[in-house]
Image (cartoon, rainbow, N blue to C red):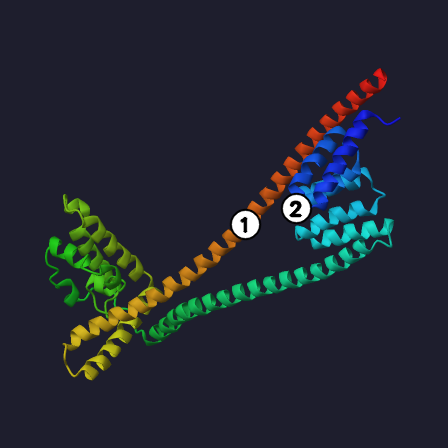
Amino acid sequence: MVEQWEEDAAALKKQGDTAFGAGQYAEAIKPYTAAISIDDSNHLFYSNRAACYLKLNEKGKALKDGEKCVELKPDWGKGYGRKAAAQFALGRFGPAAQTYAAGMRIDPENAALKQGYADSKAKEKVAEDAKKAAEEAEKKKKDDEKAAEEDLLGDFFGDIEETVEEQQGKAVKKETRPQEKFTNQDLGSSASQITRVLQPNFVWKNLNPYNVLQLDVDANEEDIKGRYRKLSTMVHPDKNLGVENAKDAFDEVKKAYNLMKDEEQRLYCKALVENGRLRGIEVYKKQGGVEGEGAVKEKEVMKVFAEIEAQRRQAEKMKLAGKKRERAKEDEEQTKLKTEMKFNKEFKQEGRQEARVAGWRDMQKKKQHKKN
């Protein structure tokens, strides 16, 4: 004897089939869902609703119904086709091929399963090739950027090493006594020194520590120490209370001194100054004496230091950009992982809810059966 609920579910399925046949997929979902609410153990209801979802491009829902269909009727080949079609639509070509293959083991002559399997394998290969090509392209890009960065930094630090070695080769016995031309040099007032150290474009002009300390390239260690003591005292904030820029001037002087304390750095800066002066002589000759030779030399020296600083900043910029891309990729992977975890969690929660509803329906069916 056919139960009333079975007749109701069958009638709803027929209603859904009619809507599906007319291409009204959204309308067909409603009666299929109502049929499932009456009998959630019928695999056909899930199969048909999965087909509707797939037509409406609701791939995740189609996959969920396809999986439920296989769970309820594991010996029905078409159910595997529903699940695999959803996997294919989601771009999961490898798993789709496996699902199609599982269905073919049950229904070897099913043409739709065979075609789906072939399409999935073809797409899987294309996807793998594309992924491999993208990974190789990304690797090449990173390798090229790293090589460029290493070349830039290599040139920068290579120049330092070469010029330092050259200067060390030229070096004579160190002069340990301060030279009178520096000790007797008039340094002016504290206010004039603060103004000089923080003059317009000081960020670039002060790249040359000799310029900050008002020393020439023949200054020895004692000259440098003595000059730092005098200048730092003149511009020190405690000696210039109420002078807003005193600390900034003091910091510039201290930075220049720290650079000059290091012998290799000092020799390198000396080489840059000498190189700039030679360039200045050439520019002066080409200009025909439009500007004074000293002013031209000073400009070229500043340009040399600015060029080196620009190279250093570019190298740092490339390095930071590389790190930023790596962090962005890591963030993207983390977001993707969290999304998948959230989806799986929600899916499991929905599954538990459906199980509770199914248990309640079974209990209602048993009660109804007893009454009859």
Q: Secondary structure at mark 1?
A: helix
Determine which quarter of the picture holds residue 353.
top right
Distance in Å between CA atoms under marks 2 and 1 = 22 Å
Disc 1 residue type (three-letter): Glu
Locate residue 321, reporting x and y percent: 45, 58
Along the horizontal axis of the image, is 195 left or right of 26? left
Disc 2 residue type (three-letter): Lys
Residue 253, label in figure = none
Q: Nearer the viewer, residue 29 or 335?
A: 29
Is 366 rendered above or below residue 281? above
Locate residue 118, reporting x and y percent: 77, 59
**Sequence-wise first label, 2 or 1:** 2
Determine which quarter of the picture holds residue 117.
bottom right
Mark 2 highlights which residue? 59
Q: Nearer the viewer, residue 19 or 25?
A: 19
Is 176 rendered above or below residue 35? below
Q: What quarter of the picture does the C terminus occupy?
A: top right
Q: Which label lies toward us, 2 or 1?
A: 2
Which residue lies at the image location 56% right of the left edge and 62% below the top edge?
138
Which residue lies at the image location 79% right of the left edge and 42% below the top edge?
70
Which residue lies at the image location 72% right of the left edge and 54% below the top edge?
94
Along the horizontal axis of the image, is 66 left or right of 150? right
Which residue lies at the image location 70% right of the left edge and 45% below the top edge?
22
Determine which quarter of the picture holds residue 132.
bottom right
Locate residue 153, reporting x and y percent: 43, 66
Furthest toward the top, the residue is 371
Residue 332, label in figure = 1
Q: Do labels 2 and 1 touch, CB within 8 Å?
A: no
Q: Is residue 177 visible?
A: no
Q: Is residue 199 visible?
A: yes
Furthest toward the right, the residue is 1
